[in-house]
Image (cartoon, rainbow, N blue to C red):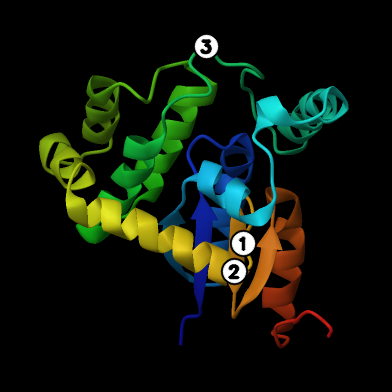
């Protein structure tokens, strides 16, 4: 029987991009059922004490750029550290993932194309026309997907994802939640893989 994992992320997150292919390989190898749960990071940070990038101390901002270079090399990727259209208004892009999943399609091809568009092609994912092009490029009905993404149903799911994230102790992107155990950050993917391979019980905070 397949195990399920909750995948919390936002398409605006470079760390979600860096870890995505590795996570998908782990999920495939362990035959995981993935619950894609895009969340609005601004609200996640506000609710859990995090700070948006431009509010962080310059020391932290500089270190982030070093870490991006390290993980770019580690994961064998090529991308811009400061792409032209980043940050961007991400709500519609995130809700596109929600729409694809709600329409019983696999969000993975769209996510890979979207991440590439942001970090490698320097395209503007806040532009509806750009999003439609990316949706169509992975063989989906762009108008139908975008109509759903713009709907109240998608907005409600996006809000519910946020509630579930906070309730489940998620405080950043990406976060992978297995049996209630949070693995925060793509740099925890190896630990997730170890836990799946061992078949151990989920760890809990010690009171």
Tell me the crowding category of disc 1: few under 14, some 14 to 19, or many 20 or more residues within 10 angstroms, Cα based: many
Q: At numbered mark 2, what does the secondary structure look like: helix, strand or loop?
A: strand
Residue 112 at what x, y percent from top left?
A: 45, 38
Q: Which residue is mark 1?
A: 170
Marks 1 and 2, how far apart at CA:
8 Å
Report whether 63 appears left or right of 19.
right
At a point 54% along the width and 24% down the height, the residue shown is: 119
At a point 63% along the width and 46% down the height, the residue shown is: 19
Q: At numbered mark 3, what does the secondary structure look like: helix, strand or loop?
A: loop
* Closer mark to the observer between disc 1 and disc 2: 1
Which quadrant of the figure has residue 189?
bottom right
Q: Which residue is mark 3?
A: 84
Q: At numbered mark 1, what does the secondary structure look like: helix, strand or loop?
A: loop
Q: Earlier in the sequence, mark 1 or mark 2?
A: 1
Q: Earlier in the sequence, mark 2 or mark 3?
A: 3
Q: Which residue is mark 2?
A: 177
Which quadrant of the figure has residue 202?
bottom right
Marks 3 and 1, how far apart at CA:
29 Å
Q: Is residue 29 visible?
A: no
In front here: 91 or 140? Answer: 91
At a point 48% along the width and 33% down the height, the residue shown is: 115
- The answer to the question of whether label 1 and label 2 lie on touching residues, with beta carbons closer than 8 A, is yes
Residue 1 at what x, y percent from top left?
A: 46, 87
């Amino acid at each position: 029987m397949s195990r399920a994992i909750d995948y919390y992320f936002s398409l605006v997150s470079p760390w979600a991009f860096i870890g995505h292919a590795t996570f998908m390989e782990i999920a495939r190898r362990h035959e995981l059922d993935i619950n894609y749960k895009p969340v609005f990071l601004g609200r996640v940070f506000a609710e859990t004490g995090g700070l948006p990038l431009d509010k962080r101390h310059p020391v932290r901002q500089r270190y982030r750029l070093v870490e991006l270079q390290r993980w770019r090399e580690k994961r064998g990727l090529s991308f811009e550290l400061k792409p032209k259209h980043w940050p961007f208004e991400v709500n519609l892009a995130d809700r596109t993932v929600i729409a694809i999943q709600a329409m019983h399609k696999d969000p993975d091809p769209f996510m890979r194309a979207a991440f590439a568009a942001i970090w490698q092609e320097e395209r503007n994912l806040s532009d509806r026309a750009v999003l439609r092009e990316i949706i169509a490029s992975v063989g989906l009905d762009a108008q139908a997907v975008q109509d759903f993404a713009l709907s109240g149903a998608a907005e409600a799911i996006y809000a519910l994802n946020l509630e579930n994230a906070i309730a489940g102790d998620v405080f950043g992107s990406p976060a992978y939640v297995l049996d209630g155990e949070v693995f925060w950050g793509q740099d925890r993917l190896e630990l997730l893989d170890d836990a799946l391979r061992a078949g151990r019980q989920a760890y809990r905070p010690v009171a």
